Image: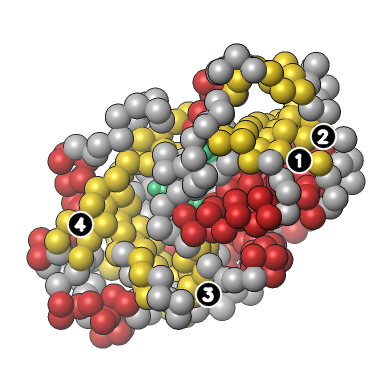
Amino acid sequence: MKTIIVGGGIVGLSAAWALKRAGADVSVVEQGALPNPLGTSVDQHRLIRYPYGAQRGYLRMVREAYHGWERLWGDLKMRFYAETGTLVLSGAGDSWAKECVVALAAEEIEHLAFDAEAVTGRWPMLVGDGLEDAYYCPSGGLLFAEAIIAALSSHLRERGVPLLTGKAVAALDAEAGTLRLADGNGLRADRILVAAGPWTGQLLPDLAPVSRPSRQTIVYLQPPAEFTAAWHAAPMLLEIGATKGFYLVPPRVTRDGMRTGLKIGDHRFGPTADPGGDREPSAAEIDAILDNARHRIAGLEGYRILQGKTCFYDVEPEERFQFRRLGARGFALCGTSGHGFKFGPVLGEKIAAVLQEKEDFDAAARWAAGHVIPDHIIDVPAAASDSSG
Ligand SMILES: Cc1cc2nc3c(=O)[nH]c(=O)nc-3n(C[C@H](O)[C@H](O)[C@H](O)COP(=O)(O)OP(=O)(O)OC[C@H]3O[C@@H](n4cnc5c(N)ncnc54)[C@H](O)[C@@H]3O)c2cc1C
């Protein structure tokens, strides 16, 4: 049985990896290069962490995700990961940290409560004013995203998986199992998986409402010399508020000499735009990101802006990943809503199991959407809010 995957981001490549591992005949069609710098999966890093607000299903999936990454590291013969720990902060009136701690306690994930003084004592580059809740998890860290996509692509090529780059799929017929490429050529498969990230709605208009391309700005900064060492030892930071908030990825130098920068972003969703369109962030977009973090980072105006970047989320309104059936031969995985990278390998394995009819589609779709099994729900806080990364 031949499978064609549309899209060489973390979802498509992970599904190809899992299918190939299971002995299947699989190819990937990617409109850009691999890694594609415009893809959602391609930046220096993506975060993996347990604090997940009230989204208990995804918190649980993080456990599975760590196992999935271990299987992938085994095949790649290298780990593209740096453990940093996770610091969750909340100002007055924001509930995200409180929701996190209820879930972390229920799921027995190690975490410690800090007060504002302890936070600024341990991390002097932070400001404690207005801090209501602070929790630190020793777990959580950085997945070196672009390096992972590059290594996974090389691994698949070495294993004989055709990766057709620079080939855009213009249309597909999921009943017949045919794809039409933009260059006029056609392809045929027994199974088609669309893993097109924020381009999903362009190829499959029916899925546009659950895969809105949302323009997100990130900013790379160089901290002042006095704080460089402290940032290199700092955890990731998540201060997620209803009206204001940010996430911060600390810089690292890995044992293999990989250097990654200090990055700030805002998980709240941006305006809808064409992911193939203009990517230059405006000065106002960069300022808005810095404004969100100014209250928490001491002397932020002294940090040098190295780069502003635009990246695209594909947003499902409740941030639930959508695993959909398309006709007799097709499937799509979309709506990863700015938090899907960490689950790449386990999503790939789940998709592969369904395509090979080893697992039930409906159960897999519920799992991907982060629905917890009812008799495992304990004290789910009322308001589900957003999460970072
Ligand atoms: C700023 C930012 C921060 C994030 N932070 C985190 C984080 O900390 N933790 C986390 O877990 N997740 C995070 N995410 C989300 C995560 O990166 C995404 O959920 C994940 O990368 C989505 O992968 P994908 O494979 O679905 O999409 P993509 O990586 O976008 O891959 C889709 C691919 O399909 C190709 N394609 C599209 N249409 C066609 C076509 N018609 N023909 C051929 N090829 C096509 C595209 O070129 C692209 O390469 C973040 C996202 C952003 C933007």
Instruction: Determine the CA span between mark 2 and mark 1.
Output: 6 Å
Q: Which residue is mark 2?
A: 2
Label 4: element kind: strand
The amino acid marked with disc number 4 is: Leu
**Where's residue 105, x and y in %?**
59, 71
Instruction: Determine the CA span between mark 3 and mark 1.
Output: 35 Å
Q: Which residue is mark 3?
A: 139
Tell me: 303 left or right of 378. Answer: left
Q: Residues within 10 Å of mark 3 (few under 14, many from 20)?
A: some
Using the rendered view, name the quadrant where residue 324 is placed: top right
The amino acid marked with disc number 1 is: Val
Tag 1 or tag 3, which sits nearer the N-term? 1
Tag 4 or tag 3, which sits nearer the N-term? 3
Tell me: 20 left or right of 88. Answer: right
**Where's residue 78, x and y in %?**
59, 71
Camera-side residue: 205 or 299?
205
Instruction: Determine the CA span between mark 2 and mark 3.
Output: 39 Å
**Where's residue 387, x and y in %?**
46, 52
Q: Nearer the viewer, mark 3 or mark 1?
A: 1
Tell me: 280 left or right of 55. Answer: left
